[in-house]
Amino acid sequence: MPDSLRQALARALRWGAGLAAEVGMIGSNDPGAKAFKSFGAGAVLLYPQGVIYNEHYMVIGEKTMVGPNTCLSVGIGPGQTMASDPVITIGERCVIGRGSHIVGHWSIELGDDIQTGPYVYITDQNHVYEDIDQPIGIQTPIEAAVSIGSGSWLGANVVILPGTTIGEHVTVAAGAVVSGVFPDRCVIGGVPAKILKRYVEGQGWVSADAGT
């Protein structure tokens, strides 16, 4: 293929991709936003969207941006009636990285001004394996509410498991698998995640190895 033709086709392809991204995104004034319990002004779901269903159990705060290929799901499948409402709440001015999954069954609450890297997975339900004679996939899963405080940052590929509570202004290192309760203003990381350092008034940032 001649370079001139390849370059012309490349320009056309990039133009088409840009047009698709602009037309395909869901903003607060678009029909797709009406399916949500609440969809704040200035919020946007970038194109292409991942799997999204049972939006009427979801709240998206003002000026929040959900990256492309992000999956937002409530329950096992479309049309399921849930015991709580809303199930997923994302606060204002959040940025959810591309390819992330937020999978809710009971309660997932994200505060304001939270940012995540790509491919973050947040869920409030997990499989159990108590009965060694039953396939794990058909045992009744556990559910426990998840809460992430305002101003926090979750690095790429972080996994947030059921029952996790993360305080405000917390940094979660990339690749961490998080379960449990973590206070405000700390850095956590690892598998399983633990506190690496905390901000102590009058001392600044103190390593966990220092015994604080």
Image: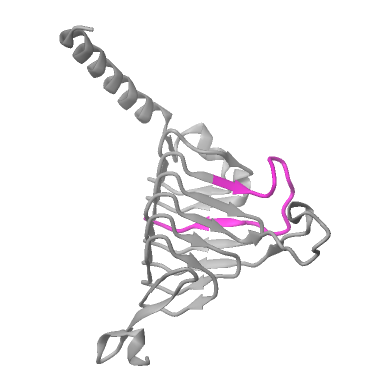
Residue 136 as seen in the image, left or right of residue 46: right
The verdict on residue 86 being magenta is yes
User: Considering depth in this image, is 27 or 154 the residue closer to the camera?
Assistant: 154
Residue 7 as seen in the image, left or right of residue 132: left
**Image quadrant of residue 176?**
bottom left
Question: Which quarter of the rendering shows the N terminus?
Answer: top left
Tell me: residue 97, above or below residue 126. above
The verdict on residue 165 being magenta is no
Colouring rule applied to residues:
one colour
Tell me: residue 212, above or below residue 141. below
Residue 6 as seen in the image, left or right of residue 91: left
**Image quadrant of residue 94?**
bottom left
Residue farthest toward the right in the current orientation of the protein: 133
**Image quadrant of residue 212?**
bottom left
Residue farthest toward the left in the current orientation of the protein: 4
Tell me: residue 175, above or below residue 8. below
Q: Residue at x 53, y 49 (%)?
A: 38
Residues shaded magenta? 72-93
Residue 93 position within the rendered picture, expressed as x and y whole percent measured from the top left: 37, 55
Residue 174 position within the rendered picture, expressed as x and y whole percent measured from the top left: 38, 61
Residue 123 position within the rendered picture, expressed as x and y whole percent measured from the top left: 58, 58
Q: Residue at x 56, y 44 (%)?
A: 36
Question: Magenta span: helix, strand or loop, mainly?
Answer: loop
Residue 52 position within the rendered picture, expressed as x and y whole percent measured from the top left: 57, 40
Q: Residue at x 59, y 44 (%)?
A: 55
